[in-house]
Amino acid sequence: MIEVRQISKSYNDVQALKDISFSVEKGELFGLIGPDGAGKTSLMRILMTLLLPGGGEAKMAGLDVVKDYRKIRRLVGYMPGRFSLYQDLTVEENLSFFATVFGTTIEENYDLIKDIYVQIEPFKNRLAGRLSGGMKQKLALSCALIHKPEILVLDEPTTGVDAVSRKEFWEMLKKLQQQGITILVSTPYMDEAGLCDRVALMQKGEILSIDSPEQIVSNYDRPLLAVRSDEMHRLIHDLRQWDQVETAYAFGQFVHVTPVDKQVKPETVTAYLEQLNHQNIQSSFIRAGIEDVFMALMTRESRSVQSQ
């Protein structure tokens, strides 16, 4: 449904995308995962025919994003990162406007948006600019769906909304996927990666890995420990200074540690920290998550660049 081959893009001296390639199957929920500056928005704007690529080619439903941009805009629904609806129009007026633009009506495709729109319909006469973050999100998604698109492209749709709204939004995406809609979504939140069928981990305009979330995690072949003590700032510093530690990153109340020696034991880490007078030490093996894998890939990539 989506084909991306060797796409690149530069802004003056900054290369935002470096030979990006991936494909998304029909009916798949595919995620672009990475921090701000990874190139996610540039890639999505190219796919949405809003930005010309610097090199390579991309197709949406078999249509070229440069040559067939008019056709693509009619069969794809787009929800940009920033709320871009008319804030001085009401909820209902915004939805009616987008339905009219695509030559349809709210009534004709109401079944597609019903589960989403019913949550904001009681506020249909409220100006869009006065909606909460979660309600704006639902309105934007309704407007992106009103013309019954084959592909739905969502650029960081849950950024800036509360945890409950994020959960509800992903539940809505799963329901839309069950209706056969192909979904491409970007997010900086690593915990949302596990909700996708497949993900591409992105950093500095490059794809570090593409696979199902489960397979990406299972490919992590190093031991990983969660360590904590009373002095977290000093803990991170001391662990990074130890020649037996490859990486140490803060994860909530713990520091996730990748040791140099694959045979290391938690007791060895505890003994080292006790020598440095750390108190109330906890050290245990844990299973790696998507964020751990991402940090490991970033470290590996950085070292590869430095060695060149």
Image (cartoon, grey):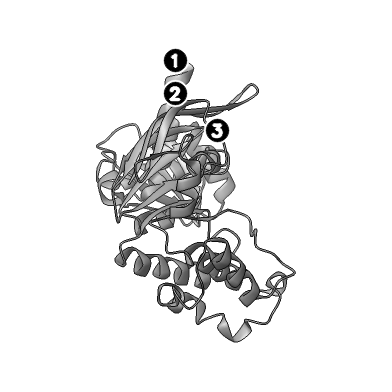
Q: Quadrant of the rendered structure where residue 59 is? A: top left
Q: Residue furthest bottom?
A: 122
Q: Amino acid at mark 3?
A: Leu
Find the distance from the CA under tag 2 to the CA under tag 3. 32 Å
The residue that appears at 50% across and 68% down in the rendered structure is 104
Q: Which mark is residue 307?
A: 1
Name the one closer to the observer, 238 or 39.
39
The residue that appears at 62% across and 81% down in the rendered structure is 124
Residue 128: image location, x then y, percent: 68, 71
Find the distance from the CA under tag 3 to the CA under tag 1. 33 Å
The answer to whether residue 150 is above or below residue 175 is above
Q: Callout 1: helix, strand or loop? A: helix
Please state if 241 lies on the left or on the right of 64 as rendered: right
Q: Which mark is residue 96?
A: none
Q: Mark 3 highlights which residue?
A: 52
Tell me the quadrant of the picture where the C terminus can be found: top left
Name which of mark 3 and mark 1 comes first in the sequence: 3
Find the distance from the CA under tag 2 to the CA under tag 1. 6 Å
The residue that appears at 63% across and 69% down in the rendered structure is 94
Q: Callout 3: helix, strand or loop? A: loop
Q: Are marks 2 and 3 in contact (CB under 8 Å)?
A: no
Mark in the foreground, 3 or 1: 3
Name which of mark 2 and mark 3 comes first in the sequence: 3
Residue 32, visible in the rendered structure: yes
Please state if 75 lies on the left or on the right of 232 as rendered: left
Query: Callout 3: few (<14), some (14-19), or many (20+) C-alpha neighbours within 10 Å?
Result: some
Q: Mark 2 highlights which residue?
A: 303
Query: Callout 1: few (<14), some (14-19), or many (20+) C-alpha neighbours within 10 Å?
Result: few
The total of numbered circles placed on residues is 3
